[in-house]
Image: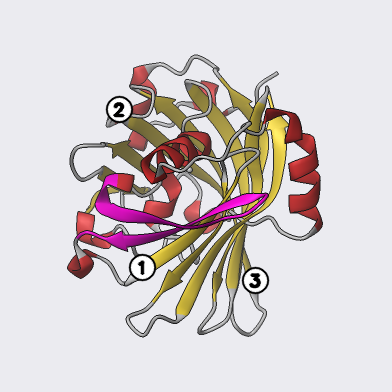
């Protein structure tokens, strides 16, 4: 499910984790990708976060979404479960998005619409479409499987690894390539630019702020920007906690219609 941080944010982030930076630069691109994927989506064995999402269109008009994300790893670096329950505004309250993320096949995704009492299966072909009207995609919530792309190390600087990724199945996505910048101190991707067939960037994902949560460097503010048409969506993560002991039944079909309220409440 797994974000926007620049200027002073990057400076202070580098200073905060300078002591944990690797002693030597990595040169194996697969190792870099594996560590970045782990840092972005596999901190702790499970986790909970409340999210405030602000959607701003190209006219500056804003919409608000609030929801809680629950995540549980079935294997470190492997399959995961994600559960997203919306609380605001009223027209999306109790809407649920659930993902069974797989590393060896397409993810399973469901959307529950309480107004219609309808469970909708989201096909693999829809994973790169708008997530509840925002600039984020369904795929952004649980993360793109690195096995779907070929990676190339473009440049290594004092602070970052700059990678280029090309989809193995170009017909399955709307981009021709994307480039990502990974902070060496935290191994978190801090910027991802998606390019069209004309090699022009049209979409940007950024990590704007990182904080230490229970010893894990964690993105707490992220943004997706439409570089072509304007507009952007920002997500702010709060009340985050890792290793809370989520049971498997939280991610069952029953939880689509009956919210697991004990686990959605803020931790004490």
State which mark lies toward you, 1 or 3.
1
Residue 155 painted magenta: yes
The answer to which of 93 and 267 lies nearer the viewer is: 267
List x then y, in percent, for residue 33: 42, 43
Question: Marks 2 and 1, how far apart in space?
Answer: 35 Å
Q: CA distance from mark 2 to mark 3?
A: 33 Å
Residue 5 is left or right of residue 85, and the answer is right
Q: Residues within 10 Å of mark 1 (few under 14, many from 20)?
A: many
Q: Is residue 248 magenta?
A: no
Q: Is residue 91 left or right of residue 118?
A: right
Q: Which mark is residue 62?
A: 3
Residue at which label 1 appears: 177
Tell me the SS state at disc 3: strand
Position of residue 213 measured from the top left corner of the image (x, y, whole percent): 68, 28
Front one among 253 and 41: 41
Q: How many numbered circles does the render carry?
A: 3
| Range drawn in magenta | 147-168
Q: Nearer the viewer, residue 11 or 245?
A: 11
Q: Residues within 10 Å of mark 3 (few under 14, many from 20)?
A: few
Query: Would you call the spot at circle 2 few (<14 residues within 10 Å), some (14-19), or many (20 or more)?
Result: some
Q: Residue at x 70, y 18 (%)?
A: 268
Judge by depth and name the residue closer to the eye, 243 or 6: 6
**Marks 2 and 3 close (CB-CB < 8 Å):** no
Secondary structure beneath label 2 = loop
- Residue 6, compared with residue 73, is above or below; it is below
Q: Which residue does the image show at 72% across and 37% down from the upper left?
A: 211
């Amino acid at each position: 499910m797994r974000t926007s941080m620049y200027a002073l944010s990057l400076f202070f982030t580098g200073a905060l984790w300078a002591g944990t930076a690797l002693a030597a630069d990595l040169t194996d691109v697969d190792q870099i990708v594996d560590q970045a994927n782990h840092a972005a989506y596999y901190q702790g064995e499970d986790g909970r976060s409340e999210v405030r999402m602000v959607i701003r269109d190209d006219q500056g008009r804003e919409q608000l979404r609030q929801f809680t994300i629950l995540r549980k790893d079935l294997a470190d670096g492997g399959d995961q479960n994600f559960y997203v329950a919306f609380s605001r505004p009223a027209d999306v309250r109790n809407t649920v998005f659930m993902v069974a993320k797989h590393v060896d096949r397409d993810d399973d995704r469901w959307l529950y619409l309480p107004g219609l009492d309808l469970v909708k299966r989201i096909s693999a072909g829809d994973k790169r479409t708008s997530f509840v009207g925002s600039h984020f995609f369904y795929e952004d919530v649980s993360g793109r499987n690195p096995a779907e792309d070929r990676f190339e190390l473009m440049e290594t600087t004092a602070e970052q690894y700059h990678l280029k990724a090309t989809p193995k199945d170009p017909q399955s996505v709307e981009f021709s390539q994307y480039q990502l910048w990974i902070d060496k101190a935290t191994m978190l991707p801090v910027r991802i630019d998606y390019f069209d067939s004309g090699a022009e960037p049209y979409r940007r994902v950024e990590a704007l702020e990182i904080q230490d949560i229970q010893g894990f460097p964690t993105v707490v503010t992220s943004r997706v920007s439409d570089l072509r048409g304007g507009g952007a969506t920002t997500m702010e993560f709060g009340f985050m906690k890792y290793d809370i002991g989520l049971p498997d039944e939280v991610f069952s079909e029953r939880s689509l219609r009956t919210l697991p309220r004990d686990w959605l409440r803020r931790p004490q």
